[in-house]
Amino acid sequence: MEVCGIREHLWLKRDPQRPGKIFKHVAPYVLRLEELQTFMNRLASLKVPIDYCGSLGKHIMDKKLGLMKSHDWHVLMQQLMPLALRGLMDAHVRLSLMHLS
């Protein structure tokens, strides 16, 4: 992209603090550490009716979602993710994910 002169904001740059290293930009859909912690806390503390989905709090381990049944993933992706993502990420990315859900 740099050779073609397009999308300058995506060009790889040299890291001034570490010579010989290249700095790569983070994708806009990746949660920062504090945003990830907020997202996981929201999922862990979420109270849902009995038999709605499994307990999500017990599946959250070390900032990762553990093994869940397919129905629980379905509920998470379609109904709970837009709720848990409120106020996180850039608005255009968040709204795109919410519309996909």
Image (cartoon, rainbow, N blue to C red):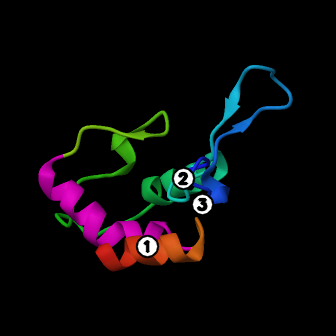
Q: Residue furthest front?
A: 4
Mark 2 residue element: loop
Residue range of the region highlighted in magenta in the rendering: 69-86
Q: Which amino acid type corresponds to the residue marked 2 in the rendered image?
A: Ala
Identify the mark at residue 83; answer none if there is no mark. 1
Q: Is residue 9 left or right of residue 27?
A: right
Q: Is residue 74 above or below residue 12?
A: below
Q: Is residue 18 left or right of residue 64?
A: right
Q: Which amino acid type corresponds to the residue marked 3 in the rendered image?
A: Arg
Q: Nearer the viewer, mark 3 or mark 1?
A: 3
Q: Which residue is mark 2?
A: 27
Upstream in sequence: badge 3 or badge 2:
3
Q: Residue furthest right?
A: 17
Magenta-span inclusion, residue 55: no
Badge 2 density bin: few <14, some 14–19, many ≥20, Cα 10 Å: few
Tell me what residue is drawn at x 66 percent, y 50 percent. 34
Percent of width and height locating residue 40: 49, 51
Identify the mark at residue 7; answer none if there is no mark. 3
